[in-house]
Amino acid sequence: MLRVDPATGAWIDDYFRNLPSLLRPGDLLILNDSRVLPARLFAVRGGLRRQQKSPVPSGRIEVLLTQQLDGQDWAALVRPGRKVQPGETLLFPDDSGTTLLTAEILSAGEFGERTLRFAPDPNFLEQLERIGHMPLPPYIRRDHAMADTPEDRLRYQTVYAASPGSAAAPTAGLHFTPGILAELKARGVQVETITLHVGLGTFQPVRVERLDDIRLHSEHYTLPAATAEAIELARKQKRRIIACGTTTTRTLEHCAAIDRIEPHSGSTSIFIGPGHRFGIVGGLLTNFHLPQSTLLMLVSAFLGSSGRERALAAYAHAVRERYRFFSYGDCMLIL
């Protein structure tokens, strides 16, 4: 774990296991308890809706469910996208070839984005668990394109995950163990949760030249009553509020921006970049992010007026010292 002083940009090499000793009694640590769905599916094409004859499956289609919309509707990424157009039906079989789920393509967007409407199924999540695969990032290699393991279902999930809905893990939370959480609480650190279901909004690459033109996808969040009350009290008592991960940070800063520190659910597409004035978050635990990503811009914003230079210097140090990047990589504590 790389410790970074936001005021000076100075860094110290440390270990995550020391986190409890680095936080103070009375600090408020907020985690994202979203649970990753086995949202990577493989389908066969079932034909066009207008056809009266029984559909004839042909070709395998990879589908990544990124966000539940209304009812049975889901946003998804489809590959190869050019082959799957609105009006088509996708069939999702199990290993025996029995179709367990069926979906119609409602609309098409850029970069393989599609809106799917699944046929009503009271056991939808159970069927997803049967035929779905964990949406591992492509750099986590497996022996077979469709492969994931029981260990993946355990490890690509935080130990405190509770609310199903994410298409990717909130990776800063992957470092925690039950033992570390117990140590934090024993030290007097207050631990609360929010829920933000991770979708395209978090990992969308920057495709524009001007920051003002960045538009993120919307993601669903929930601010529970216990967390809202804890935030208000911590602010009143001037105690530190530390966010675990950029997803937690975006949720809290969205709530600060709309001035709703009360129990509620909603959607956020907030972009946090240079010049952002943080209204709630006073400390940040985060993994290392890719260049030209909105997540790295958030980290730079948190490091203040010289944030870009400080972030690049810290990253250069991390590269020299062979810190690990990506989902199962090392982390940074900015406090």
Image (tube, grey):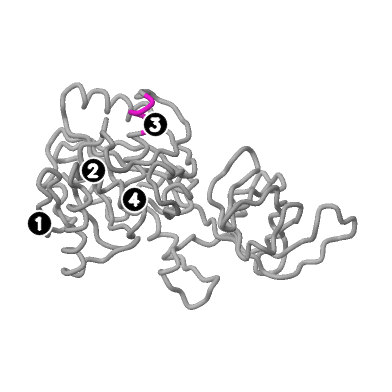
| Earlier-in-chain disc, 1 versus 4 | 1
The amino acid marked with disc number 2 is Phe
Q: State how far apart marks 2 and 3 are (Cα).
A: 22 Å
Q: Position of residue 311 (x, y in %)?
A: 21, 53
Q: Position of residue 278 (x, y in %)?
A: 26, 34
> Would you call the spot at circle 3 few (<14 residues within 10 Å), some (14-19), or many (20 or more)?
many
Q: Are marks 3 and 4 in contact (CB under 8 Å)?
A: no
The residue at the far right in this view is: 52
Q: Which residue is mark 3?
A: 223
| Earlier-in-chain disc, 2 versus 3 | 3
Q: Which residue is mark 4?
A: 295
The residue that appears at 15% across and 47% down in the rendered structure is 20
Q: Position of residue 246 (x, y in %)?
A: 33, 46
| Earlier-in-chain disc, 3 versus 4 | 3
Q: Which quarter of the picture shows residue 271?
A: top left
Q: Secondary structure at mark 4?
A: helix
The amino acid marked with disc number 3 is Leu
Image quadrant in which the C terminus is located: top left
Q: State how far apart marks 1 and 3 are (Cα).
A: 33 Å
Q: Is residue 114 magenta?
A: no
The residue that appears at 16% across and 50% down in the rendered structure is 19
The magenta segment is: 254-258
